[in-house]
Image (spheres, rainbow, N blue to C red):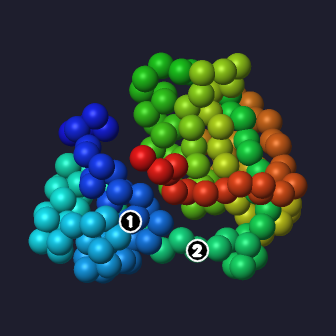
């Protein structure tokens, strides 16, 4: 199933559960203008088809003292598929790395790293990131303020 196969009810379900994943079927049905049974059938189909991949609580990292954010450019010494796979697997095991993106750029990966402080970040960089497979160089950019940080997709 792809985007072109979604009708307005499917799209509205995605918009509503994207804002409130804990909404009841009754409230969801009311919001999209269908009865409960077809709403639930559509929701389950969207889950089964892998369009809705899960539900989770959004945690405010700043309230937990994790307000230091750094973006790290990573250059690898080897970019063959085996090296990329090894790096990908290793990067998922570092909890401080919130995001990791393979880039089409003068560097290979962009990492978003969240820690409690600059000294905690320096430790993560020195002991964890720099020792990832095939890392040859890193450059760090420290965020001063998050102007927009939203995990939800734009309305579909």
Binning the other alpha carbons within 10 Å of mark 2 as few (below 14), some (14 to 19) or many (20 upward) gives few
Between the C-alphas of marks 1 and 2, the distance is 17 Å
Q: Quadrant of the N terminus?
A: top left
Residue 142 appears in the picture as rendered? yes
Q: Position of residue 10 (x, y in %)?
A: 27, 53
Which disc number belongs to residue 59? 2
| Residue drawn 78% across the image and 55% down it | 147
Closer to the camera, 18 or 126? 18
| Residue drawn 72% across the image and 35% down it | 73
Q: Earlier in the sequence, mark 1 or mark 2?
A: 1
Q: Position of residue 120 (x, y in %)?
A: 79, 64
- Kindly state the secondary structure of the residue where label 2 is placed: loop
- 1 vs 2, front mark: 1
**Image side of residue 53 versus residue 40, left or right:** right
Q: Is residue 30 above or below residue 9?
A: below
- Kindly state the secondary structure of the residue where label 1 is placed: helix
The number of numbered badges drawn on the structure is 2
| Residue drawn 48% across the image and 19% down it | 80
Q: Is residue 71 above or below residue 109?
A: below
**Image side of residue 12 versus residue 9, left or right:** right
Residue that lies at the very extreme toward the front in this rendered image: 33
Q: Say which quarter of the image contains residue 40.
A: bottom left
Residue 55 appears in the picture as rendered? no
Q: Say which quarter of the image contains residue 131.
A: top right
Q: Are marks 1 and 2 in contact (CB under 8 Å)?
A: no
Residue with the mark numbered 1:
17
């Amino acid at each position: 199933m792809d985007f072109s196969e979604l009708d307005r009810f499917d799209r509205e379900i995605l918009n509503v559960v994207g804002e409130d994943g804990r909404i009841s079927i009754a409230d969801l049905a009311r919001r999209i203008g269908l009865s409960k049974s077809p709403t639930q059938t559509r929701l389950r189909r969207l889950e089964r088809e892998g369009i809705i991949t899960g539900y989770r609580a959004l945690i405010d990292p700043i309230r937990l003292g994790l307000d230091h954010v750094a973006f790290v450019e990573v250059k690898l010494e080897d970019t063959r598929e085996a090296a990329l796979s090894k790096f990908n697997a290793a990067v998922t095991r570092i909890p401080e790395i919130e995001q990791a993106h393979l880039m089409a750029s003068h560097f290979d990966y962009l990492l978003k790293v969240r820690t409690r402080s600059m000294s905690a970040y320096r430790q993560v960089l020195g002991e964890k990131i720099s020792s990832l497979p095939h890392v040859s160089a890193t450059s760090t950019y420290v965020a001063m303020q998050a102007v927009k940080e939203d995990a939800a997709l734009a309305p579909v």
